[in-house]
Image: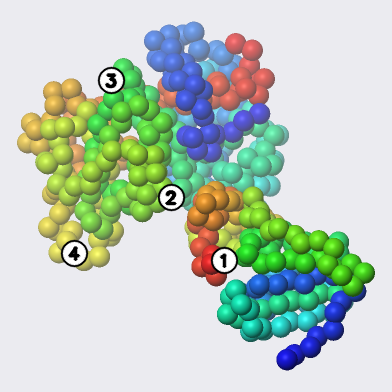
Amino acid sequence: MRHLMSPLDLSIEELDDLLNLANDIEKNPQKYAHVCDGKKLATCFYEPSTRTRLSFEAAMLNLGGSVLGFSSADSSSASKGESVSDTMRVISCYADIAAIRHPKEGAALVASQKSLIPVINAGDGGHQHPTQTLTDLLTIRSLRGELGNLTIGLCGDLKFGRTVHSLINALIRYENVRFVLISPEELRVPDYIREDVLEKNHIPYEEVERLEYAMPNLDVLYMTRVQKERFFNEDDYIRMKDFYILNKEKMKLAKPDMLVLHPLPRVNEISVDVDDDPRAAYFKQAQYGVYVRMALILTLLRWKGDLTC
Amino acid sequence: MLNISGIHEGFVLDHIQAGMSLSIYHDLKLDKLDCAVAIIKNAKSNKMGKKDIIKVECPIDALDLDILGFIDHNITVNIIKGDRIVDKKVLQLPKQVRNVIKCKNPRCITSIEQGLDQIFVLTDEENEVYRCKYCEETYKNTARKR
């Protein structure tokens, strides 16, 4: 039995198989409509989430299974002081697979250690959010045809954004990937990403402050939100906030086939007038999130031997 | 010259970085052993200038010395039996250490989960980097590196 804690838990071959399965699900949803009949997914969400929880639930329902769970710590035994480990041990008796989100880093790993069913990390604090990374990879591969030979711009809060760190770690495994890191000084990627991941693996990258400078060379632009509270002083925030807002004007600088991705929720970092641009892929990305979670549920249940199809 | 009598069976931990002996005394839980322990601080050393030494009179299976590799793998461990050195143990960085150090990341699950061991895993042997098994926070111990 295997769990998914980090996108790097999957080898490149396993990841390819998973993304191929997700694409097959996209093309032939009827073929998979009953493969999980009688199976139950437990969604154990210790903190609020809209997209991730509903995406997991939609994925299991699309496969013919059913869902149970809780959507905040207040409505679980955590409010009575029960440990994550005990909660998961009990939930193992009720469901066939579980997705857990918890504000503490490493909580999903603790849950998996005593679990009798596969556990999927649906976000553990600022640490990992592997199904978002799988979603990003599926979106890029489906819309571009490959994950290598790519210049990707990562824009916004690169310091605290776990999706950005996970995506960098996942993409460096592919050939000829180049990163343009677009952020204010305060929100540059942490040293360990720059030194231990990019430089150690001889991955080409550049760091820039202005989105406009980077736009013309990008194949993919991955936007994230810059939050005011991350800045040390308000003057810097006011000076820079517009640098990181993507609008129709800035889109004119981009290649005709550049993709715009965003993990969502979007606040104001992408103007709504970009939504109709055919290069805006962030809502398609949300759809791909359901396909990849369907593929993941299927794969983990197959590996456990619970499904024969 | 300070003289401390030899030991019949036990360990002599030599070449301890000066000033570290008391911390090692606690890390090895020597305070819980009912045996003779001598701590020599700031002894003269040709190699190190000054050093600490710990002598422990105890059965040679009474101590778990793996943790010493984590604290400082340059320490020399002499194993004494029948009043003479029978072996010198070469210390290595352990692959993981359990319940020796605590994760300092307040966002780590170890800060709230009951009964959870504190486990750090060696992730970069060359640079002696240990990371929390759960949140991957790096443990920095400048005293360990010489």
Q: Are marks 3 and 1 in contact (CB under 8 Å)?
A: no
**Label 4: which residue?**
A234
Residue A145 occupies quadrant: top left
Q: Earlier in the sequence, mark 2 or mark 3?
A: 2
Q: Nearer the viewer, mark 2 or mark 1?
A: 1
Mark identifier at residue B144: 1
Query: In the figure, A176 relative to A101: above or below?
Result: above
Drawn side of residue A59 relative to residue B125, left or right = left
Query: In the figure, B18 relative to A273: above or below?
Result: below
Frontmost residue, A8 versus A24? A8
Amino acid type, mark 4:
Glu
Mark 2 to mark 4 CA distance (whole Å): 24 Å
Residue A287: x and y in percent read: 35, 24
**Label 3: which residue?**
A144
* Secondary element at tag 1: loop
Mark identifier at residue A126: 2
Q: Is residue A304 visible?
A: yes
* Secondary element at tag 3: helix
Mark 4 to mark 1 CA distance (whole Å): 41 Å
Mark 2 to mark 3 CA distance (whole Å): 29 Å
